[in-house]
Structures are given as structure tokens and as C-alpha cells.
Image (cartoon, rainbow, N blue to C red):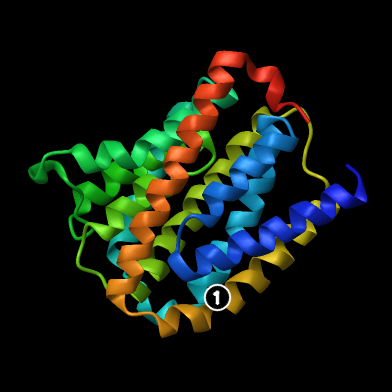
């Protein structure tokens, strides 16, 4: 990988960590799309996992006092069951399928009847979404749109959403890194790994003041818009790859 490409990826990781630091979402969605465009899917998923582990882990520490711990335990349990099941078949999806699933997931949540919509306060919902989100993370690299919709469906204020979702994502991305490390032919470049951690922590730290300045109403309004725009982008990209073939995604 050329120094110019490494620099471009590093700037992308810094920007996406900042975006996720403000909204608790969207950054990972953008980053995985960029990584899938420049490297094979298993290697892209490994680097994405390292980046998101650093970003979400640091975000959890910055907002530690706002974390709601009860949902996290049930979410992690559901995620562990899912990754164990997927590990038995070691499945890696085509990029086009991954992008389509990624883009469609938030719209699936929105069309569910009210009685089936997620509630972060219920243990069964947390465990169920842990399993579903982990499956989506293995298939697409991220579970952001689905997990974002899950937490926005409850009554948490913005800092509690950011903190609790980040802690859940630490478990999810750790499991994802283990899974793709076992199926990938090669590991990630150590230089990229170090840069991923540094850029993720820097972007997350810079975002804290912006989040503090927002109201809960502003947060929810802009978060919903971000989810929609990014989801539609991935549906378009995945559909294009499905029509013209996977070779266009090669670096």
C-alpha cells in the first residue's frame, strides 16, 4: 500500500471517528465503504474492527458515567451466541450483498409494527438485537443502522445513547476481529493498525465538545437524517456492484 493511500485512509479514519463521536453512528458506515473499495473484504473487516474497537473503547471511557450497563450484558450474550454460530460455517459474503444488507437494515426497523419495535429497556430485546447485530456485522462489517435505530427507539438521552451503544460496539467489533482474523489469508498492516488506533482516539476526543453543545432534539433529528442518507448510498452502491460485477470493487 502506497504512502499516499495510507495517508488518505488515516484522514478518513480521523474524520469518521469524529463523526461517530458526535452522533455515535455513521462514521463506521462510511469507513467500511472506503475500506471495501481499496482492499479485500476479510482484510478490510479486520482493519475496520481495530479502528472501531479503538473508537468505541475510547468513547466509552470518555462518557463512562453515562453508560447503562444492564442492556450491555444481554447484548453481549446475544452477540456471543451469534458469532459462535457463524464461526461454524466461516462465511464471507460478496461485497455487493454486504452493502445491500447494510443499506436495507434501518428501513426494515422503520417498517416494523409498533409492537415489534425495539426497546433497550427489555432484556429479551437486547439479547435478540445482540444476535442480529452481530450477524449483520459479520455479513457487512457494521451493524450501525440497526443498532442506531434500536437505541433511538428508547427514552435515553443523547449521552446515554452514545455511551451505551459504544460499549455494546466494543464487544461486537472484538468478536468481528476474532472471526475475520480466523478466515482471512493475511493480517492487517501493523502501521495501519497503529494509525487506526491513533486516529480513532483523536477524532473521538475532538467530537466531545460538539456533542455537549447539541440538544437532544438536534441530536435525534440529524442522526435520523444521517442514517437515511448513508443507507440509501449503500443500497445504490451494492445494487451497482450486483449489476456490473464485483471486479469494479478491486483496488
Image coordinates for residue 108, horizontal then vertical, percent:
27, 36
Quadrant for the C terminus in the image: top right
Residue at the far left in the pictured view: 115
Please tell me which residue is depicted at 38% across the width and 47% down the height of the picture: 228
Give the vertical position of 65 relative to 90 (above or below): below
- State left or right for residue 236 relative to residue 74: right
Please tell me which residue is depicted at 59% across the width and 55% down the height of the picture: 52
Q: Judge the density around disc 1: few (<14), some (14-19), many (≥20) Cα neighbours within 10 Å.
A: some
- State left or right for residue 157 relative to residue 155: right
Give the vertical position of 104 relative to 75 (above or below): above
Q: Quadrant of residue 168?
A: bottom left
Could one spot residue 92 in this view of the protein?
Answer: no
Give the vertical position of 244 relative to 8 (above or below): above
Give the vertical position of 130 relative to 246 (above or below): below
Image coordinates for residue 22, horizontal then vertical, percent:
48, 70
Image coordinates for residue 156, horizontal then vertical, percent:
25, 70
Q: Quadrant of residue 217?
A: bottom left
- The kind of secondary structure element at disc 1 is helix
Pick the residue in front: 191 or 250. 250
- State left or right for residue 198 relative to residue 104: right
Q: Which residue is mark 1?
A: 207
Please tell me which residue is depicted at 31% across the width and 65% down the height of the picture: 220
Quadrant for the N terminus in the image: top right
- State left or right for residue 240 relative to residue 162: right
Could one spot residue 147 in this view of the protein?
Answer: yes
Pick the residue in front: 115 or 180. 115
Amino acid at each position: 500500500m502506497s504512502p499516499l493511500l495510507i495517508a488518505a485512509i488515516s484522514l478518513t479514519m480521523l474524520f469518521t471517528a469524529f463523526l461517530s463521536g458526535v452522533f455515535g453512528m455513521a462514521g463506521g458506515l462510511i469507513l467500511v465503504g472506503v475500506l471495501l473499495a481499496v482492499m479485500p473484504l476479510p482484510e478490510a473487516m479486520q482493519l475496520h474492527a481495530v479502528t472501531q474497537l479503538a473508537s468505541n473503547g475510547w468513547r466509552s471511557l470518555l462518557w463512562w458515567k453515562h453508560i447503562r450497563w444492564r442492556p450491555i450484558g444481554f447484548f453481549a450474550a446475544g452477540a456471543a451466541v451469534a458469532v459462535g454460530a457463524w464461526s461454524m460455517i466461516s462465511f464471507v459474503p460478496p461485497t455487493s450483498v454486504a452493502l445491500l444488507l447494510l443499506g436495507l437494515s434501518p428501513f426494515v426497523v422503520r417498517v416494523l409494527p409498533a409492537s415489534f419495535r425495539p426497546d433497550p429497556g427489555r432484556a429479551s430485546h437486547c439479547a435478540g438485537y445482540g444476535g442480529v447485530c452481530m450477524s449483520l456485522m459479520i455479513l457487512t462489517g457494521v451493524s450501525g443502522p440497526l443498532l442506531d435505530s434500536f437505541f433511538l427507539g428508547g427514552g435515553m438521552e443523547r449521552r446515554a445513547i452514545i455511551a451505551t451503544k459504544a460499549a455494546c460496539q466494543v464487544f461486537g467489533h472484538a468478536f468481528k476481529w476474532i472471526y475475520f482474523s480466523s478466515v482471512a489469508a493475511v493480517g492487517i498492516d501493523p502501521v495501519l493498525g497503529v494509525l487506526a488506533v491513533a486516529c480513532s482516539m483523536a477524532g473521538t476526543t475532538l467530537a466531545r465538545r460538539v456533542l455537549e453543545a447539541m440538544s437532544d432534539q438536534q441530536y435525534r433529528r440529524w442522526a435520523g437524517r444521517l442514517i437515511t442518507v448513508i443507507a440509501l448510498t449503500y443500497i445504490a452502491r451494492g445494487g451497482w456492484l450486483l449489476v456490473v460485477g464485483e471486479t469494479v470493487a478491486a483496488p
